[in-house]
Image (tube, rainbow, N blue to C red):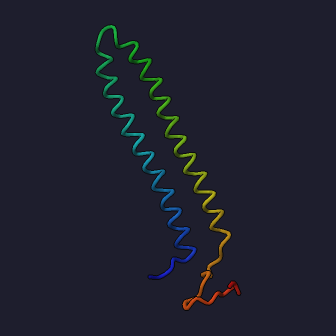
């Protein structure tokens, strides 16, 4: 099995980060769309419409906050991972056959 290069690992890290971002965006959109359908129905029921509208606004705000937090954590973890990967160079730690290119035991 071949080893990944640092560039490949960095690309994988960015791909994962981009995937989490896109997934959070898509999930939030679907989440809000489904909730809006429920509140639209409740909005037509006398005596419930007004409180439902207030709950909808609170729910929308909280949901948006949760997904913003997911995106912020993803960004932070991605930045930390990218900085950690920058500490390595392109040379493998061990050469084929077990020899160390850096003189490590």
Which of the image's four quarters has the N terminus?
A: bottom left
Q: Quadrant of residue 84?
A: bottom right
Residue placed at 46% from the left, 23% from the top?
57
Taking the view exactly as shown, the residue that stands out farthest to the top is: 47
Horizontal side, residue 41 vs residue 1: left or right? left
Task: Relative to 22, say whether 62 is above or below.
Answer: above
Horizontal side, residue 69 vs residue 50: left or right? right
Residue placed at 66% from the left, 62% from the top?
83
Residue placed at 45% from the left, 29% from the top?
60
Residue placed at 57% from the left, 51% from the top?
75
Image location (x, y in percent) of residue 65 = 52, 35
Image location (x, y in percent) of residue 78 = 58, 56
Which of the image's four quarters has the C terminus?
A: bottom right
Task: Relative to 74, say whether 89 is above or below.
Answer: below
Taking the view exactly as shown, the residue that stands out farthest to the front is: 105
Image location (x, y in percent) of residue 22 = 44, 51
Question: Which of these two is toward me, 103 or 73?
Answer: 103
Task: Relative to 13, say whether 45 is above or below.
Answer: above
Taking the view exactly as shown, the residue that stands out farthest to the right is: 103
């Amino acid at each position: 099995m071949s080893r990944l290069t640092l560039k490949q690992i960095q690309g994988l890290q960015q791909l994962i980060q981009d995937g989490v971002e896109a997934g959070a965006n898509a999930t939030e959109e679907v989440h809000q769309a489904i909730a809006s359908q429920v509140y639209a129905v409740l909005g037509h029921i006398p005596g419930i419409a007004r409180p439902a509208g207030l709950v909808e606004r609170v729910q929308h705000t909280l949901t948006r906050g949760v997904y913003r937090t997911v995106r912020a954590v993803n960004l932070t973890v991605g930045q930390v991972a990218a900085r950690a990967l920058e500490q390595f160079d392109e040379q493998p730690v061990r050469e084929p056959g077990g020899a160390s290119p850096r003189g490590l035991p």
